[in-house]
Image (cartoon, coloured by chain):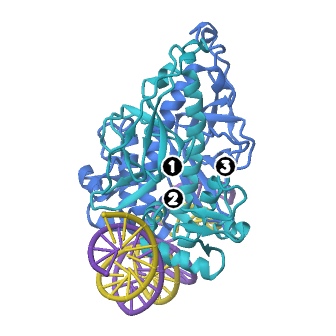
Chain colours: A blue, B cyan, C purple, D yellow
Amino acid sequence: MFDQTATIDRQSVPAGAFHSSPIDSSHVAGSVVRFGRHKAVFRAGDDAERFFEVESGSLMLYRLLDDGRRQLVEIVFPGGICGLTASEAYESDCETLMPTVLRSYRMADLARSDSLRTRVIGQLQRQVSAMHDHAVSLGRKTAEERVCSLIVRLHGVAANAEAAQRSVTLPLTRTEIADYLGLTLETVCRTITALMRRKLLEAGRSKAEITVPNLSKLRAAACCDAF
Amino acid sequence: MFDQTATIDRQSVPAGAFHSSPIDSSHVAGSVVRFGRHKAVFRAGDDAERFFEVESGSLMLYRLLDDGRRQLVEIVFPGGICGLTASEAYESDCETLMPTVLRSYRMADLARSDSLRTRVIGQLQRQVSAMHDHAVSLGRKTAEERVCSLIVRLHGVAANAEAAQRSVTLPLTRTEIADYLGLTLETVCRTITALMRRKLLEAGRSKAEITVPNLSKLRAAACCDAF
DNA sequence: CGCCTGTTTGACGACAGTCAAATTAGGTGG
DNA sequence: CCACCTAATTTGACTGTCGTCAAACAGGCG
């Protein structure tokens, strides 16, 4: 489907890095890797030799069932970690949602760098919390609440970049949104259309762009919680 | 609903502990806390001062929506961690599913003990993987597949305890199963009944006990993946 | 024995899924 | 720059799985 070639760009560790904090027995900066949109970072079943930290861009992690059903299990934004697993092989597929810069570490780097460990723990905490919210969406929310929850979250993540803008650029196609929210493509379309009719959303200049006229109303429609 | 009192039992740190590995600046053993069945460990909104490691027993973490909908976001078995959050307050409620022994740590202990950090990272990896599987169940599996997946998992966890037994003791009520699987109580009942008619399950001596005549058939009905 | 909680079963309805077709958007090459 | 081609999105009609409402049943404990 997509070209799976990435522009791999192993930057050398900055010279000064070798002389910093004495706490780390070795200096682990990771290697920078760049990917275009919709490139595979790793595949389920690949040897899990490395894990990744998102510098910019975003990723999706998904699992496939034998019969083709797909579930996006996580969307990873800058600062997030993926591919860190205790098992031999990755258990999900990982693809970029947009041009993305990752920092790649060997699994063993975690044992070497105390600062990396600390960073990873903080990040895993945040990701677990996001996954709890996601479980609530999948298990207990209606289609409309799920769509609103996702847009509220994407709005929050984009807030830095687009300042106080009310416009949100969806990094996901309708199919990806559906696979993240446990719905079908058709239900996602119909739901977005309905939200526009009700003025909770407004069309942007492309299908991937949406304007949020009233964030608190949207948040209410998402059914209260964190995002 | 339940008596929220726990038997708290702050054990002193073993004497020898103060003289071990020089890497940890302080020696963090945590305090042992014991709870009966269906006791609250913490509530959403409580100050998140401590996190917990399950020594024996099991826990459920759940979130409630304003209108009363509930979603169990995690079931935590021995070795598992809960309550570890970057935010000020817990974001879920946590209750025991059976009499349970926890080890309680202050959030700050994590910064002090390198061995604790390492253990926590490994555990978070396993829990993230379990949550990914759960997301697949919630988003993409049918009621029957979800029920089978859960029983297969519970069978796996109990395997140590009950050896090669084919019987599984469900630590969850039907309502809790429903709230974990994103179904209703009635659907869970009907699904279990249907599985028994089809001989994928057999009744045990109580409602909470179930016999699995053929694990691989059950696993197939759960739709393939890890659990 | 009786109450309370948890479980089971039934009848019916609704939300979201399936199948199908039309429309739009993007990207490529002439 | 435009025509064309493919992928993505939208909309419609109908179906089915699971939720809702209701009532009966079972089990544990005082």
Give residue A35's position: percent from left, percent from top.
62, 39
Q: Chain of mark 3?
A: A
In the image, taking residue D29 as reference, residue A83 lies left or right, namely right
Q: CA distance from mark 3 to mark 2?
A: 27 Å
Which numbered dot is residue A121?
A: none
Q: Position of residue B104 (x, y in %)?
A: 45, 33
Image quarter hosting the N terminus of chain B: bottom left
**Which image quadrant for residue B90?**
top left
Residue B171 is labelled as: 2
Of badges 1 and 3, nearer the viewer stands 1
Q: Amino acid at mark 2?
A: Pro
User: Can you say whether A55 is above or below B7 in the image?
Assistant: above
In this picture, residue B211 sits left or right of residue A223:
right
Depth order, front residue of A124/B57: B57
Instruction: Give the side of residue A226 with respect to residue B26, left or right.
Output: left
Residue B153 position in % (x across, y down): 61, 58
| Badge 2 density bin: few <14, some 14–19, many ≥20, Cα 10 Å | some
Left of B152 or right of it: where is B42? Answer: left
- For the residues labelled 1 and 2, say whether their Cβ atoms are less than 8 Å apart: yes
Query: Residue visible at 42% across and 28% down?
Result: B107
Nearest the eye: A212 or A91: A91
**Residue, disc 3:** A91
Determine the secondary structure under disc 3: loop
Q: Is residue B31 above or below residue B37?
A: above
Q: Nearer the viewer, residue D29 or B65?
A: D29
Secondary structure type for disc 2: loop
Q: Which residue is mark 1?
A: B58
Residue A67: x and y in percent read: 67, 68
Label 1, label 3: how far apart the Cα atoms are: 25 Å
